[in-house]
Each structure stands twice: as structure tokens, then as C-alpha cells.
């Protein structure tokens, strides 16, 4: 009795396949032939390539790229650029120091932030005293200037000397400390 439904399903499948006759394939072939005869592709002619005219190489007037003179000029140029860069990045020694520049940044704790007159203000705790910090204020011993204040972080740009004595910029920050006492 179990094989009866299988026989019925096989008969239905055979009937459906018989409905797909070769005549449908002939119609498809005729349609493809009609489409090919109606479509005419446009061929755009190619532009003739430019003629290459080789140039003769003459070494007589050229400077040797490995000469000592050329190397000296390059080193002088690089040293003047580094001097110009150090003039751009240097601490403002002539300005009056702010109160929070007397403490190292790692002794400070950000305990909150708020907005005053639409401007972000961070609350920083040092030695059990609370200070308000705004963008543009200076913090820490390394000439750190507040560049950005978020709800959870103060972003600083510090100016420090590297091993060669040149002034460089360094990113620093204070992250909100929840539950800081």
C-alpha cells in the first residue's frame, strides 16, 4: 500500500514532462534568430595611436645623482625643513601658566562633564579639589592643551622633547573615572 502514492506521483511527473514538448524549444530558437537579425551593433572606429619619437640620452649636461655635491644639497634642504618644523612646534614659554599645569596629568581624574552656555566643560579632580576645564585650557607638566571634551574623555595635545631635543606633538587624554573618590 505504501508504494501506491509513489506510482501516482511518478505518473503525474511523466505527464508533466510530456507537456514540455520540442515545439517550445523550436519557438525559442525562432525567437533567438529573430532577435539576432534585428539587432545591429554599432562599432566605433579606434583612434590611430600617436607615433612615439625616442629621445637621445646625453649624459654630458646631466648631474650625477650619486655625487657628493648632490647629497650635500639634499641634506642641507632636509635640515632646514626640520628647523622650520621645530619653529612651528614649540611650547609657548612666554604665556602665563595656568593652575592645572603644576600637576602631572596622571594625578588628575576626570569625574564628569556638563555643558555651560552650549560649550562642553569637564570636571577634573586633583587632591580632593574639583576644577572646571574648557577647550583651550592647559593641563599637566608637558604643555598639554585641551583640544576636545566629550562626555567620557578629555583629549589633550602635549608638546614634549624627543631624544634629539626637537619639540614634537603627542596625543594624551583623560578618561572618565566612574565612582572616583
Image (cartoon, helix red, strand yellow):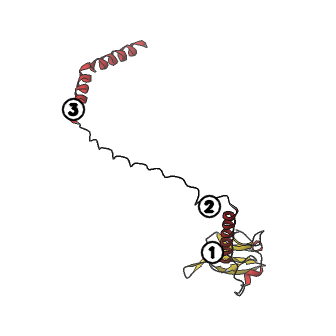
At 23% from the left edge and 21% from the top edge, which residue is drawn? Answer: 23
Q: Position of residue 137 (x, y in %)?
A: 66, 81
Looking at the image, is mark 2 or mark 3 nearer the viewer? 2
Which mark, residue 37?
Answer: 3
Would you identify the image quadrant in which residue 86 lies? bottom right
Q: Which residue is mark 2?
A: 63
Q: How many angstroms separate mark 3 from mark 1 (CA)?
A: 71 Å
Give the alpha-carbon distance from disc 1 to disc 2, as whole Å.
48 Å
Counting from the top left corner in percent of width and height, residue 29 is at: 25, 25
Quick check: can you spot residue 170?
A: no
The front one of 175 and 10 is 175
**Residue at image point 21% right, 35% down:** 38
Q: Quadrant of residue 12?
A: top left
Question: What residue did someone put label 1 on?
Answer: 147
Q: Residues within 10 Å of mark 1 (few under 14, many from 20)?
A: some
Question: Horizontally, is 102 left or right of 150 in the view?
Answer: right
Mark 2 closeness class: few <14, some 14–19, many ≥20 residues within 10 Å: few
Image side of residue 34 versus residue 139, left or right: left
Q: Position of residue 135 (x, y in %)?
A: 62, 78
With 149 as the anchor, is 168 left or right in this view?
A: right
Task: Give 72 or 32, whichever is nearer the viewer.
Answer: 72
Amino acid at each position: 500500500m505504501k508504494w501506491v502514492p509513489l506510482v501516482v506521483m511518478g505518473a503525474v511527473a511523466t505527464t508533466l514532462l510530456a507537456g514540455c514538448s520540442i515545439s517550445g524549444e523550436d519557438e525559442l530558437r525562432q525567437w533567438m534568430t529573430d532577435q539576432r537579425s534585428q539587432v545591429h551593433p554599432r562599432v566605433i572606429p579606434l583612434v590611430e595611436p600617436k607615433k612615439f619619437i625616442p629621445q637621445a640620452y646625453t649624459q654630458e649636461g646631466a648631474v650625477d645623482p650619486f655625487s657628493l655635491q648632490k647629497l650635500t644639497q639634499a641634506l642641507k634642504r632636509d635640515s632646514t625643513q626640520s628647523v622650520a618644523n621645530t619653529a612651528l612646534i614649540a611650547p609657548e614659554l612666554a604665556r602665563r601658566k595656568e593652575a592645572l599645569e603644576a600637576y602631572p596629568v596622571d594625578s588628575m581624574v576626570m569625574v564628569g562633564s556638563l555643558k555651560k552656555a552650549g560649550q562642553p566643560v569637564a570636571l577634573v579632580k586633583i587632591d580632593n579639589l574639583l576644577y572646571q576645564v574648557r577647550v583651550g585650557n592647559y593641563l599637566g607638566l608637558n604643555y598639554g592643551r585641551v583640544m576636545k571634551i566629550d562626555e567620557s574623555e578629555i583629549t589633550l595635545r602635549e608638546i614634549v622633547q624627543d631624544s634629539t631635543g626637537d619639540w614634537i606633538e603627542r596625543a594624551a587624554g583623560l578618561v572618565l573615572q566612574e565612582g572616583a573618590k
